[in-house]
Image: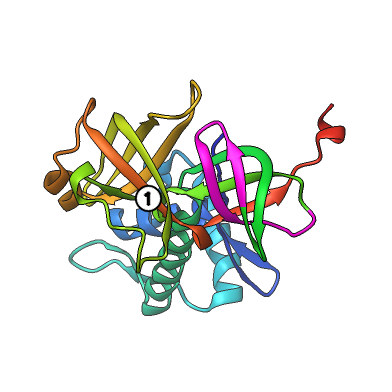
Amino acid sequence: MEKEFDPYLRIDDVSIDRSDVAMLRAIDDRGSLSGAAAALERSYPRLQQRVVELEAAAGPLVERTRGGADGGGSSLTGTARDLLARFDRLVAAYEGVARVDETVLTGPVVDRDGELATVETGAGDVLAVVPTDAATASVTIRSDAVSLHAPRDVPRAEGTSVRNRFPGTVSWLETGDAVARVGVTLADGDEGSDLVALVTRRSVAALGLEPGRSIVASVKATAARGVARDERTEE
């Protein structure tokens, strides 16, 4: 299951979405509305009408020049570039949520200390924030809340808020430009009990992460969030 989102900016009654952003960027790249229409395989009259609709709400977006030695053309105004920058910031903010993996571990609550509860899961006991009325809980752990350590460098429990530690083995690694997604098969977990961590490429190099590498994943108790699970409803 993957999270998806459809970002847009609303100005009065007009919504500016990905297709509008692609249109403005094509105009900027091609230097004309007709060139943008051809690049996007869109009707020129419809593209032109869409520009008019957006400008009625947001103000001048496209500056047109006619004739001259260069034959005229179109370029984006400062308003249009500010609009594109706002859209990029919106997408970046949502991607920070939508592209974070979540591992869900479920089991009965076997102990409690106020808002913190110990949940017995297939991956071992997990200390998490769980509603006080929950007898069984599903605990969600976000990949950006997981830290990875070499087995010899695991911090001691005393004097630290990291209460959940899971020994395991790196099962897969997906590296991006700056960060990497790491799958960890938990040593004490049931089959399929994998934890996903999001780490920097510097950490990948420092820890020598590769499939088969022994590793310890740690999660703060306050970063593991549980919700009550109603077994009667599931049945």
Side (left or right) of 65 relative to 220: left
Q: What residue type is labelled 1?
A: Ser
Q: Position of residue 74 (x, y in %)?
A: 34, 65
Question: What is the magenta range?
Answer: 118-133
Q: Residue shown at 37%/75% (left/top)?
A: 77
Q: Residue shown at 58%/36% (left/top)?
A: 121
Q: Which residue lies furthest to the top in this view?
A: 191
For numbered disc 1, what is the local secondary structure? strand
Q: Name the residue under label 1.
A: 218
Side (left or right) of 137 relative to 91: right
Q: Which one is in front, 109 or 229?
A: 109
The reply to whether residue 1 is visible in this rendering is yes
**Quarter placement of the N terminus:** top right
Q: Residue shown at 18%/66% (left/top)?
A: 69
Q: Where is residue 22 in the image (x, y as percent from the top left)?
A: 43, 52
Q: Position of residue 50 (x, y in %)?
A: 57, 58
Q: Which one is in front, 99 or 203?
A: 203
Asked if residue 132 lies in the magenta stretch, the reply is yes
Q: Magenta region, mostly helix, strand or loop?
A: strand
Q: Residue shown at 61%/45% (left/top)?
A: 119
Q: Which one is in front, 109 or 11?
A: 109
Q: Which one is in front, 94 or 214?
A: 214
Vertical arrangement, residue 202 with respect to residue 108, above or below = below
Vertical arrangement, residue 11 with respect to residue 38, above or below = below
